Image (spheres, coloured by chain):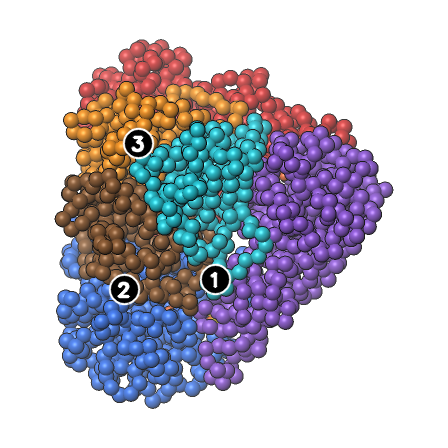
Chain colours: A purple, B cyan, C orange, D red, E brown, F blue
């Protein structure tokens, strides 16, 4: 629209007023800001690209995007996980157009340049001598990412050769919490199939900010369905929300929010008893205790990965069932976001339980999910609401942080800076403070 | 399910014999009346058309390269429902405070290419469906199309839907939610 | 009319009894033949299908929030026509100098979900219509869909259209004009 | 396209050559010009937002846009008319997504912030104490426009606190003419329902310029339908067009064109006799005389409101019937415009007449109207015709003004500078001269 | 062929007499079953439905200005095929190495407005077809619509398609290829 | 996306590394590059607009585009070929919206300004006196191109008054080859009807570069269909490809590639014997000899015209049939291209043969053609593959040129610089070198 486009770091930094707890609405609609984000964030941070269990065998691949750059995630024939830009080094034709597959080697459809699953150039149409040494084929393999790292079966990649190791981003504190979801049994979690994919008509950051710890929206936006479908009882749910809801600042823009049932009892609502025994093996006492009281767990790993776990009930005669979904918020433009949504389950889970938990997730957190449906319309309206010169001139308000950010729940048993409840907006705003650092090139 | 894989294997053509004319007309009336209920969001009356043991599925689709096909995981879907779970969904959509459909969108269901066969389990009915949805937040109509494979059974109250599978044509849903039924 | 409000109240289902097979086929033939006339802009022959006392309406639609519905004014519409006024429209569209349709667009009418009931006034027929229009000024097809509620009557010349109401699915028309009929 | 984008006032001003009667075609296709218009015009002029009769009762609201900024037009519970930006002061979610409704208060769907119909903040999820004084709720009501004013039931608003009063724009001269349409009976006009809305694929200014007084297009573009559907007879219509057709420059870019039947007789063609008596009460002699001879009246109020009144006949056995339509040309992009189209009628009109006049309007000036259909294709073609570098380098021609602008119809009985006929292009070009003032920041 | 020119002249309405109900139903079954084969790319079985002397044409369309119409050249087309040439096309599309359909797109055929007439040559059948195609390279569905004029003949193996002409509504095809049949 | 937009000649020039045989992928996706191309290339080069046989009679017109500027190609009533911008000099409305037609004069639908087929202004609504000399109608005819020229019935136009004559671009060398296609019989070629038009989702340059001489893609991408449908036999075809395939640099960015059957025998595969006799009359010995051995001929005339001729067989019982298609790659945006595709045939060809060759062309090189279908998906994938910041940062590779560009086939009997085979990438890269000259304003 009419305001001058944001083109540099200083201008971008000025869009977040750290002291005041305010941010410009241009963060949600400005094409210039979006372009900067692609450059400053998505070519430089660690980006989630998939799960090890999506490519179990050598030659298995799936196609993904990092920002708007398409990549191939493949297990090479030596068993190594690889990530390559999904374009031919010759003339840029896309190598893999399918969503997933199984290959011996990658063959470009245009002129047949062929690459190993390790990305190395193998053959062109002619034998190499034909090219008289003019084409440095040894340097013309598939373009690889700079680094790949995994945590608990989750695969991350970055284009940035100077990126700190994944453990510096997903550090001890973060892993202490994430282990409750991804490493709670000896076998770990496995994926329940390819991701659902659908498109939100709003900025990609709205989702991850919400999943940092948007307490107030839950009873408001999801009130009706919560009463119908969540947990043991609506009362218990509301008690959890209003009661113990630690919302933890994990650093680096990431956060996790837990809704805990009141009291000391470990009800393990929605968990399978056989699995609870395994949690005991893999988690420490504090983690185990938190999991036993957990109604919902919601988290975001900066910049665009989130998770949610919650017990829901769609069969009036059966107890609630927990699901765990992993969600990637893929930027398409300043006002369009593609959501990728995976379901995870413990490898050791009984067969029927796997089906149960998948259905629980599909019915609540998915394009057709009863919870996501509510969020979708509220979020989508934002783009239409604030695209004009007046709308863009106003603020996004996180001022609640000024009342709470200096009063943390210091004796919460877990690591990290813990907010006293899920209504402080602190974790949400921390995400933007981190965002500001990347845009301002402080990272 | 890849689009290359034969929907035909399960298509009614070939299995069972074509229904007689009056049954065919009854099947069409059933599907058209159902479409009216869905379009007007008269969901509680729609529920009455569903058999108690209904299986209602909308599987996820993938783009495959011929010769490289592969599947993993547990047969994911957009919808995998029972009559009970659809009741809860209906209660949510009709709840006065629920946000998903608070400003109801306009829905239109074109049901075409209806084929019906007698089978021991009931009437195996295939049809094509095109949904057109207009949401307040987007002036562009959203189109969703697919092939339905239904099983209809006679009951005291007339025909009932005992099984439905909708194979969508869209692996990626270009819309923020699926706050409707197909 | 809000999409939430029951199109059902007026739908043929429930009122009157289903027509017999040969009448149903005649209704389909009528609607399909009419669609051909509309698609080929053979408007003068189309006018012959209209009863002299025809009421032809395409009401305006609004997005409502459930629980906050309100209406004002005199029932506005896109079209509110008699046979006479349609004659003048047809003369305009076919006039050699008229600009609206001077480079005729391509029109396609998909008519589906036809239900017909006997009523004391004639045949109450509901159907869904999807119009696809290609104009010279725009390479994107324009889609317009809605539900028709028709009243057909037998006459010496065969079936005639005595009443039509088309409930569009689009509160906002994403096209510069409606130089056609539905 | 390829020419450098217009980014400042001086460049914009150079696009209109006042002396020569020429304007650059970039005014109709350039994205940079469009962005400047949103900023320089639509956040600063008075913009029409609706009619008092659209929100008769307290709590009635309709949703509108000013430029591309969405607003809520509501009658508050004290009976006051209010206009607010349609976005939540918290995180920018759209407050009202429906086209119209009736509320006690406005509740944001995301976190439930609630506002009175006067815009004031009422409640959040928690009691205020929870926020520890950090959130200045008293300043976080719905964002209001700077000023609201009405004329004859038409409501205007502006974001510009320094805007001159509405009467300075819609001044004595303008009102002298507009009263013939909006204030000709004691009861005034009322709206006949919500507006039709449809989309033209061309620049938003083409419509208002045409409605300023595009005489030549009428017999050409609307010839066939005019002969079929207008007035007493085609001859009378053509006589009016070729005869007395004062086209009045109202100042501020606005204009009105009247086609008058020849001679002194007051035929009041297409008017209801009962209403004519009331006109006598509300209008002065000159106004009454003009109305009695009026075949068509067409006007534009800068920047984007127009009206048209004309008698049409779609029933061969009945006399012609006048309609009055009010039209707003809403900018969507440089080449897309959303049209809003209301029908008005005298409050005192007989019930059947109200239905008659509405039908007359629907059939002639509407998306499906016989007149608008002709304009639509001519206008839409413009965007395709001139988007290229050659097309953009050429001019829009208004050079006829050079032959007529110094030779006004000085003894025309109405106020304002009156052009001698409807073919001079003077009122059309005056619109662009005013446009240039706003873009050049002279306003 | 301009859209203004009368598709009617050749439309089944008027020529021949309407087929009886059981023939009508057989025609519908034929077209719906054919649509399933096309949608599932079961092209070899589709070829079995084609008569050996098949003429299969999809002519090119042009935007004309009324009163300025003109044609030049030899009646160009998008497709002008025999059964033999269709066989080669099918072999290409199904070839394991062929690129056009290597990542098969999703295809959906809505066949509506079916009218059938007896003629001395066989059954003259008109219908409307809307194709919806989803390609891996584009998340927007591609729509292609038109009117089919078919000639069906009875053979030992059931009905066979002896002639097809599809008049598209799109003079400009907004898609990179036509790697499918209509 | 995020990289700064290309805005000037120096930046554009730097995108092609002539020495290295590399070009930036931004050439295929960058909106800024595209805008420069419209300005620097399409308003300045000779652009193909149609064929004389498309407008045989006075008053015949077709509508075309030059870049994105629409034009009317008309034969005026004196028999002269004319090309005008398709917009009204008054207010820019499109004059002709149809694809083709026959007129006495051009009448603008908006206000009826009327122009002769020679473009001259004829009348407005009023007689000229009405305008009081203020409107210079004599200068307000339809806006003409600067120059028009024809070669063998092909019509070219340019907006550039300083453009060198067409023969300087389509020079002796180029015509020596093109005569084998367009001037091989005394009567010359005629068009077989209006062009097919369809849309590729990729940059407009990919097609013409491919048609310069993309040898390697043919056996790879078109292998299956070649075996089914090309020529005498698949072996012969492969032999031609691998054997004598002169690929000639014509200068000015143009090129032609010929696949010749091995040996001396003139098989004239796919040609009609009656026509071969006529070739003997119109061509010299060398040309005739090349045509007699020609399996396929593929050429590009910079910037966006290509041709292809090949013998194909869709009837197992009949010999192969040659077709000749002319193809225009019309730029729509950086990632959208409209293809126009004409079929040509010798005027003297027997009636049945004309139908045969048309069908051969339709079935192989068209939107539904068996060859084009394969290219389409490979090319379309490119836009998706390289739009991101990483994709755009990489190169298009033509490094094979470094092995071959100094080792030409000097004793090839035809004129021009001839590459030794169709795999050297030299003609393709020459196209980009020429492109660089135009963008860098060296032309
Ligand atoms: S583009 Fe991949 S081999 Fe040439
Ligand atoms: S966005 Fe409205 S209450 Fe939070
Ligand atoms: S725009 Fe062509 S005559 Fe006015
Ligand atoms: Fe939520
Ligand atoms: Fe007009
Ligand atoms: Fe090719």
SS under mark 2: helix
* Within-10-Å neighbours for mark 3: few <14, some 14–19, many 20+: many
Rendered image quadrant of residue D295: top left
Of all residues shown, which one is farthest toward the bottom?
F411
User: Label 3, label 1: how many angstroms apart (C-alpha)?
Assistant: 51 Å
Q: Residue A193: give x, y in percent of width and height.
A: 58, 53
Determine the residue positioned at 78% across, 34% down: A262
Q: Is residue D270 above or below residue A308?
A: above
**Co-location on one chain, circles 3 and 1:** no
**Chain of the residue on which disc 1 is drawn:** B
Which mark lies nearer to you, 2 or 3? 2
Q: Residue D88: give x, y in percent of width and height.
A: 61, 33
SS under mark 1: loop
Name the residue nearer the viewer: D179 or D383: D383
User: Label 1, label 2: how many angstroms apart (C-alpha)?
Assistant: 26 Å
Determine the residue positioned at 60% across, 40% down: A364
Q: Is residue C23 above or below residue F315?
A: above
Mark 2 sits on what residue? E85
Determine the residue positioned at 38% across, 57% down: E41
Which mark lies nearer to you, 3 or 1? 1
Where, quadrant-wise, is the C terminus of chain C in this rendering?
top left
Residue D369 is tagged as: 3
Mark 1 sits on what residue? B65
Q: Are the residues at dot 3 and dot 1 in contact (C-beta closer than 8 Å)? A: no
Q: Is residue A163 visible?
A: yes
């Amino acid at each position: 629209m009419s305001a001058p486009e944001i083109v540099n770091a200083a201008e971008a930094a000025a869009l977040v007023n750290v002291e005041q707890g305010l941010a410009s609405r241009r963060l949600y609609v400005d094409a210039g800001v979006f372009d900067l984000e692609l450059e400053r964030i998505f070519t430089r941070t660690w980006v989630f690209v998939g799960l090890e269990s999506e490519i179990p065998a050598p030659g298995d691949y799936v196609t993904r995007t990092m920002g708007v750059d398409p990549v191939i995630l493949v297990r090479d024939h030596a068993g190594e996980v690889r990530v390559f830009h999904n374009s031919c080094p010759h003339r840029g034709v896309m190598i893999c157009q399918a969503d997933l597959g199984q290959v011996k080697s990658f063959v470009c459809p245009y002129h047949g340049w062929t690459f190993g699953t390790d990305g190395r150039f193998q053959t062109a149409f002619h034998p190499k001598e034909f090219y008289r040494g003019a084409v440095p084929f040894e340097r013309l393999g598939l373009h690889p990412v700079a680094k790949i790292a995994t945590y608990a079966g989750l695969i991350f990649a970055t284009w940035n050769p100077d990126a700190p190791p994944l453990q510096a981003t997903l550090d001890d504190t973060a892993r202490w919490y994430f282990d409750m979801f991804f490493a709670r049994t000896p076998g770990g979690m496995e994926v329940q199939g390819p991701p659902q994919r659908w498109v939100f008509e709003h900025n990609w950051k709205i989702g991850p900010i919400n999943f940092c710890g948007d307490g107030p929206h839950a009873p408001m936006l999801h009130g009706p369905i919560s009463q119908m479908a969540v947990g043991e009882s609506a009362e218990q749910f509301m008690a959890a929300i209003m009661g113990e809801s630690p919302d933890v600042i994990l650093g680096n823009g990431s956060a996790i929010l837990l809704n805990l049932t009141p009291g000391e009892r470990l009800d393990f609502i929605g968990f399978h008893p056989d699995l609870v025994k395994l949690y005991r093996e893999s988690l420490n006492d504090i983690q185990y205790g938190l999991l036993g009281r957990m109604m919902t767990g919601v988290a975001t790993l900066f910049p665009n990965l989130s998770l949610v776990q919650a017990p829901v009930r769609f069969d009036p005669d059966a107890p609630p069932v927990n699901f765990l979904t992993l969600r990637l918020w893929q930027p398409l433009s300043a006002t369009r976001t593609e959501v990728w949504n995976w379901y995870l389950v413990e490898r050791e889970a009984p067969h029927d339980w796997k089906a149960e938990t998948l259905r629980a997730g599909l019915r609540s957190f998915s394009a057709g999910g009863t919870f996501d449906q509510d969020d979708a319309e509220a979020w989508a309206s934002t783009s239409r609401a604030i695209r004009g010169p007046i709308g863009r001139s106003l603020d996004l308000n996180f001022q609640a942080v000024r009342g709470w950010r200096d009063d943390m729940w210091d004796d919460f048993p877990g690591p990290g800076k813990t907010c006293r409840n899920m209504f402080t907006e602190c974790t949400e705003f921390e995400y933007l403070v981190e965002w500001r650092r990347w845009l301002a090139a402080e990272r | 399910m890849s689009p290359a894989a034969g929907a035909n294997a399960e298509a009614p053509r070939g299995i069972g014999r074509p229904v007689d004319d009056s049954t065919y007309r009854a099947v069409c009336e059933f599907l058209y009346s159902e479409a009216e209920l869905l379009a007007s969001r008269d969901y509680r009356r729609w529920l009455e058309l569903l058999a108690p043991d209904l299986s209602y599925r909308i599987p996820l689709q993938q783009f495959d390269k011929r010769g490289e096909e592969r599947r993993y995981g547990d047969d994911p879907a957009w919808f995998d429902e029972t009559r009970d779970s659809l009741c809860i969904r209906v209660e949510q959509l009709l709840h006065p405070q629920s946000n998903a459909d608070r400003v109801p969108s306009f829905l239109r269901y074109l049901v075409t290419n209806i084929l019906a066969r007698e089978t021991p389990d009931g009437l195996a009915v295939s049809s094509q469906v095109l949904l057109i949805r207009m949401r307040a937040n987007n002036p562009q109509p959203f189109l969703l199309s697919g092939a339905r494979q239904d099983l209809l059974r006679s009951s005291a109250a007339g025909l009932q839907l005992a099984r439905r599978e909708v194979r969508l044509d869209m692996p990626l849903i270009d819309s923020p939610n699926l706050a409707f039924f197909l």
